[in-house]
Image (tube, rainbow, N blue to C red):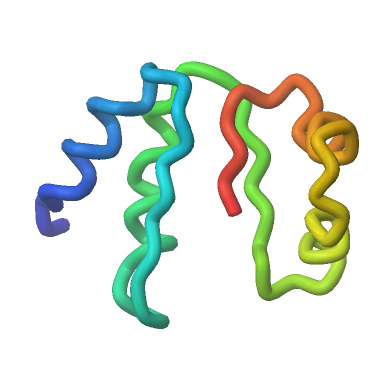
Amino acid sequence: MIDRIALNKITSKLSRHRAIIIYGPRQCGKTTLLRMITPQLDGDYLWLNGDDHADAALLSDSSSERLKRVIGTNKYLII
């Protein structure tokens, strides 16, 4: 597997309690990168797929109370 510069940058910033946004064109390796990162997470995470209609419906109402209920006790939210 190819070492990724982005992998090191992202994992070094995970403990800063800030949002990290990974974006790019389709099939450029975003999901692969996230699958490489998730085993290193030091807490529970919630993985949502924006292409899945049920997951997208969970995020359709962006009120802070609704998002808190969706995220629950998970430390990380991956969309």
Where 22 falls versus 15 (above or below)?
below
With respect to residue 54, does 74 lie above or below? above
The residue lying at 79 percent from left, 55 percent from top is 59
Name the spot of residue 19 as percent of width and height, x first: 47, 36
76 to the left or right of 41: right
State left or right for residue 52 relative to residue 9: right
Q: Position of residue 22 (x, y in %)?
A: 38, 56
Q: Residue furthest front?
A: 63
Q: Nearer the viewer, residue 41 or 65?
A: 65
* Residue 31 in the image: above or below residue 11: below
Q: Residue at x 35, y 72 (%)?
A: 24
Residue lying farthest to the bottom in this orientation: 26
Residue drawn at x 66%, y 67% as measured from the top left = 50
Left or right: where does residue 60 sit relative to residue 77?
right
- In which quadrant of the rendered view does residue 63 lie? top right
Seen in the image, is 24 located left or right of residue 57?
Answer: left
- Which residue: 45% across, 28% down? 18
Choose top left, top right, bottom left or bottom right for residue 49.
bottom right
**Total number of numbered labels?**
0
Q: Give the position of the N terminus as an image quadrant.
A: bottom left
Q: Position of residue 5 (x, y in %)?
A: 11, 48
In the depicted structure, whether residue 24 falls above or below residue 58: below
Image coordinates for residue 79, horizontal then vertical, percent: 60, 54
